[in-house]
Image (cartoon, rainbow, N blue to C red):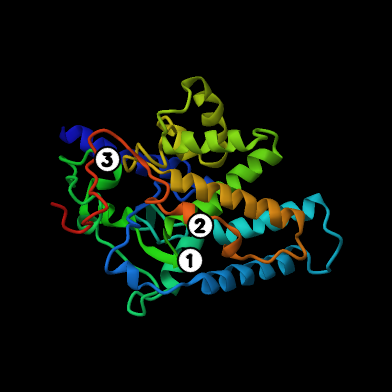
Amino acid sequence: MMIRGLWVLILPFLGALACSKSDPSEVKQETDDRPTPENLKLIDVTDRVNSWVNEIIRDSRLEVNPGDEPWNHDLKLKLVNSLSQKLAIAHPGSGLGIHWKGLNLEISTLTKIEHMIINGLSQDHHEIQFTKFIDSRFGDNPTGIIKAKFMSHVTTKTADHSISPVIRVNSNLIGVDKMGHFAEQGLWYFLAEKEGLISTPQERWQFGQFTEGDPDLDTSLHEKYRNIYGKYCKTCVMFGGFGYYGMTSTGVCSYGDLMANEGGYQFYAQIYAAPDTYEFDLKNFDTYRWNEEVTPSKFKPGLKVRSTANPLHPQ
């Protein structure tokens, strides 16, 4: 049992060391976006997030096309790449890991957009709500190297870090992790389409099912999506790939995440189509379905999940 627990802890670090070049955000967070007395106090931060992202878009336009040349295919892809560097890649220092004598090895790092939101909003001002693992809907699960059943629960720190804070956008409660999925997996969907690897909404959904570990995905499709996954996150497929951003790491297959992934794909596709005029607005995305109460998740057998009725202290 101890060997299994230690192995679960060590694998992500080995993968991160071997594949640091890909700069993925690694093990994804889950969230607890049920309505609670605390998060019902949250004010809407849609305009704040819109403003931050639009500033990044303006900076990227100037960076890749300072002379305001006609936007050809190459320039548009450069714009997408510039945005991905500012929104979708891992933010150094935002994860958990080893920092010793020049060795900086992290897992569960946040995407840059998640880091920006978390550090730009205040819990004291009711702009964001942080929840400890023990108080979350997953708090009845054991933590610790010996007892943990899931990668994200091997220590109290990893368990706490695995619970994404909650914000309110478009009047909807969502985990900040959804903005990470929007920026990172949405980019993968877009690039995979441009590279001819996927071409339909169904294939985008299936790709997401693979990353989350959805047992309903036909196993005959696993190899196809593992190969695509490996193009964008080598670490994720080093130990199988299926469910690395969901069932394997946290025990949760989040359909809310898949909804956010699709929103991110639409974001990149729209800015590619109108690189000189596009303006970001979260109101144009179906954030209602990014909430995991609205779009329920699947849970791996053995994961204890508290009900909606009494979220902090279930009967």
Q: Earlier in the sequence, mark 3 or mark 2?
A: 3
Reading the image, the residue beneath label 1 is 169
Sequence order check, earlier mark of 2 and 1: 1
Q: What is the three-letter code of the residue carrying label 2? A: Thr
What residue is rendered at 16% in x and 32% in y?
1
Q: Secondary structure at mark 2?
A: helix
Residue 83 seen by the camera: yes
- Measured in 3D between alpha carbons, the distance from the residue under mark 1 to the one under mark 3, in whole angstroms, is 30 Å
Mark closer to the observer (1, 3): 1
Residue drawn at point x = 41 percent, y = 55 percent: 109
Q: Amino acid at mark 1?
A: Val
Q: Give 41 or 210, whichever is nearer the viewer.
A: 41
Q: Is residue 178 above or below residue 233?
A: below
The residues bearing labels 2 and 1 have C-alpha atoms spaced at a distance of 7 Å
Residue density around tag 2, few if under 14, some if 14–19, many if 20 or more, within 10 Å: many
Q: Say few, some or many: other residues with alpha carbon within 10 Å of mark 1 (under 14 / 14 to 19 / 20 or more).
A: many
N-term mark: 1 or 3:
3
The answer to whether residue 98 of the structure is visible from this angle is: no
- Please tell me whether mark 1 sits on a helix, a strand or a loop: strand
Residue 300, located in which quarter of the rendered image? top left
Q: Which mark is residue 150?
A: 3
Label 2: which residue? 287
- Please identify the residue farthest to the bottom as the structure is shown: 125
* Residue 207, position as x, y percentages in the image: 54, 35
User: What is the number of callouts on the image?
Assistant: 3
Circles 3, 2 touching at the beta carbon (< 8 Å):
no
Task: Mark 3 vs mark 2: give the one in front.
Answer: 2
Left or right position of 185 against 62: left
Instruction: Give coordinates of residue 59: x percent, y percent.
Output: 67, 70
Query: In the image, what residue occupies the spot 64% across and 51% down?
Result: 266
Q: Amino acid at mark 3?
A: Phe
In the rendered image, residue 30, in percent from the top left (x then y), is placed at: 36, 51
